[in-house]
Amino acid sequence: EQAGKGEYDHFMLKEINEQPVSLAQAIEGRIDPINGRIALSDFEPGSFADVDSVQFVACGTSYHAALYGSLTLNQAGVQSTALLANEYSVSAPPIDDDTLVVAVTQSGETADTLNALRRANAEGAHTLTVTNVVGSTAAREADDALFIRAGPEIGVAATKTFSSQAVMLTLLAQRITDDLRGEPPTDLESLLSALDAMPGAIDNLLDDSDAAEIARRYRDSESYFFIGRGLGYPVALEGALKFKEITYEHAEGFASGELKHGPLALVTPDTPVFAIFTGQEDEKTLKNAEEAQTRGAPVIAVCPEDHPAVAIADDHLEIPETDPDLAGLHANVQLQLVSYYAADLLDRPIDKPRNLAKSVTVE
Ligand code: AGP
């Protein structure tokens, strides 16, 4: 097992560091080099032209990636929703044959997600699985499959597969929008150049991260909060899930604007707040972060170096300037590192957290 970890103490850290390569693999060949549009050559042009609405179903980290994809579609004007697969059997929205149901699952074997997929198949939806595992049950049972090509992920905590799922769903969202409108969204050029730069940018971020120091500085805290808006919201949820999963410390993710609707009562000097800035109404997120800071909470801004939040926050984790569709994914890598180093300081069994399994094959 040690041999498989190479120079790293844990698979999780190895897999976090593999992201420049796994992201390049996810993107490779999926952008048309001639006209610079999202090709996804797995699908004929116009394949999604009849789609009325898109439902994503997934669990855990894959649900956060699904939410990321769903919000991206909504922002492009396409009706979409992300649902927890384990809630789908009691509360699936109406489905017809113009509904596209996308099952997002790293393993392709999660029982809850398979159940939701089977229900969608039975009700006549067009189904698609986005997975890492070729030949998995979900890949076989859906009408179509898209593979994220992240390579094996051994750590129970999903890291590189989240990033690849979210990138894959960003490409899919653009392709669906393109098929529905007959033309790509206007900001496609910015997205394509940000996608192209992403593997290198993540490589630099991994080399220069202050996450270990931040984890050390806040190691004695009572609870850890993560806030984000727009595409920063699923990243806040994912940051908190990763943190609680491997450190066993209490962590919660909130939509920034929700803090004042209840969670602010929990905020004290012992509850650091990680604030994720993606370029979507950042001034509001900054205001929300300052509301927590006024109650004594240290704020760690996850944003580019010259962002106004840096001057106000107590600490800073840097991400590069990039397209708002991808900024949150860069922030997420910083948060993966914070969780990893915090768990390491606590001497947790990082690759195999108690009570959890890599693939949950029971309902
Ligand atoms: C998170 O780190 C977990 N490994 C977990 O939430 C996971 O994402 C969930 O169980 C779904 O698994 P899947 O992607 O294989 O369907």
Image (cartoon, rainbow, N blue to C red):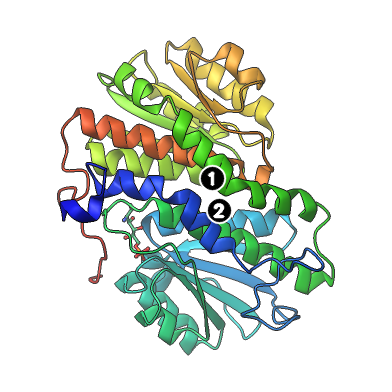
Q: Which residue is rendered at x = 53% and y = 15% of the image?
A: 313
**Residue under label 2:** 68
**Which residue does the image show at 35% across and 50% down from the upper left?**
15
Residue beneath label 1, please?
329
Q: Residues within 10 Å of mark 2 (few under 14, many from 20)?
A: many
Q: Would you say 86 lies left or right of 250 here? A: right
> From the viewer's perspective, is 114 left or right of 77?
left
In the displayed structure, would residue 51 be above or below residue 203? below
Tag 2's secondary structure?
helix
Residue 295 drawn at (x, y percent): 45, 12
* Amino acid at circle 1: Leu
Can residue 120 be seen?
yes
Residue 332 located left or right of residue 49: left
Q: Are marks 1 and 2 in contact (CB under 8 Å)?
A: yes
* Front residue of this view, candidates 295 and 245: 245
Locate the C terminus and report the quarter of the image it occupies. bottom left
- Total marks shown come to 2
Whole-number angstrom distance, CA of label 1 to CA of label 2: 10 Å
- Point out residue 231 in the picture as x, y percentages from the top left corner: 59, 45
